[in-house]
Image: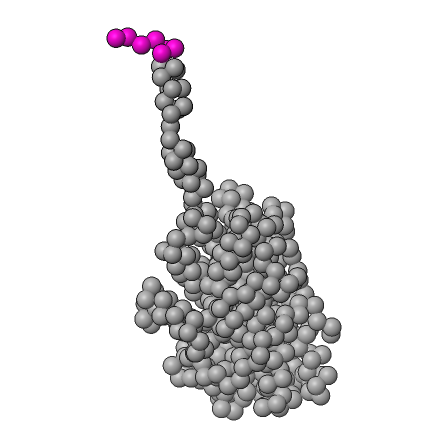
Amino acid sequence: MRYSKRDFIKSALATAAVLPATAILSHRVARAAAPVKLGILHSLSGSIAIAEVGVVDAERLAIDEINAAGGVMGSQLQTIVEDGASDWPTFAEKAQKLLVSDKAAAVFGCYTSASRKAVLPVFERYKGLLYYPTHDEGLEFSKNIMYTGADAVQSAIPAIEWLMKNKGKKFYLIGSDFIYPRTTNRIARPTIVKAGGTVVGEDYFPLGSTEFSSVINKIKAAQPDAILSTIVGDSNVSFYKQLNSAGMTAASQAIVALAVSEEEAIGIGAENLVGVNSCMGYFQSVPTPESQKFVAAFKAKYGANRVVGDTMEAGYTSVYLWKLAVEKAGSFDVEKVVAASSDLAFDAPEGKVSLHTTNHRLRKHARIGRFKPDGQIEILSESPLIDPVPFPKL
């Protein structure tokens, strides 16, 4: 029997008319469960890679865990990783790619404040959502950024208070030459002075600097009770090795590093950091069950010799905060996710944290620790949860 074109059309219409409702529903579910793209944007090369590569691993771990548990609202998460290459224009270019070409529902990334400042107008222009996991200087708010690291009130000020109580009141400030160190010290200096202390020196060095002998001589001559360091990235390798070579070990000179965690200790050399203090919201040695689970999962995925640190934990936590906000909102829409994030709480590895009602920052602990010979941290002090204050009165 031969069929005309009209017969084929009639047959197709008749079949469609009797399709069971379950088949139509199944089709709709399949459409709803399409993969959701997430961007990861960090430096995998250049002078800041020493601090950022591990953050990528932690963020991917969280995404893999969420996918293994069924995804988010029935959708699996597809990860797109881009290299900012320690170059701020590159960060902006890659951010635009993730938002415009890849249509990422959210991006987890940046480390330095300079990279965050470079991508901020991109996220605002294209109405994207960035989760920024690094401790920073504050003095910024964007409706398109969630800040999951500590601000200066949650890190620099607790470090100063601890040093003044335990080490003395004469400070030498040293940092890398970009936004975070300079602005943090704009907050640190009046904090020190108001508390009856003095700043006996302040110096900055370009990212990637490797020569610190001159400033080490200046520090020796100034005889501070404590050094407050905001040196970032691979410059820390040279800085701490040269301090040790000059005989300025932690046994004779108190130091608090605001940008050195256990992850960076591997590149610097644990032997060069023994006794150096760090102030972070999280250390691998935090004894919470969530921390122990995080550490075990990270080592199982990436190797028993790997360690975790503050920014890595904040990146890991960021992914879960996004998931919770999406589920609370019932939507991947950025505006709805942001609205659902207000006062959102999570049992993170660092302890229970919650996003502030309005300023997109986390309530966090400040922990002071001391590096041990194995590169791990002995926790010396822990604060209650500190509210974020991104715009402190100086």
- Which residue lies at the image location 48% right of the left edge and 60% below the top edge? 320
Residue 249 % position (x, y): 49, 87
Residue 394 % position (x, y): 73, 74
Q: Is 105 left or right of 267, judged from the image as shown?
A: right
- Which residue lies at the image location 71% right of the left edge and 88% below the top edge? 196
State how many labels appear: 0
User: Does residue 17 lie above or below 209 as drawn?
Assistant: above
- Which residue lies at the image location 41% right of the left edge and 79% below the top edge? 375
User: Does residue 13 lie above or below 324 as drawn?
Assistant: above
Asked if residue 12 shows in the view, the reply is yes
Question: Among all residues in the image, which is located at the extreme left?
Answer: 1
Span colored in magenta: 1-7
| Residue in the foreground of this view, choosing between 171 and 59 | 59
Q: Quadrant of residue 229?
A: bottom right
Q: Quadrant of residue 187?
A: bottom right
Q: Is 331 left or right of 17, judged from the image as shown?
A: right
Residue 23 % position (x, y): 38, 34
| Residue in the foreground of this view, choosing between 323 and 317 | 323
Residue 5 lies in the magenta-colored region? yes
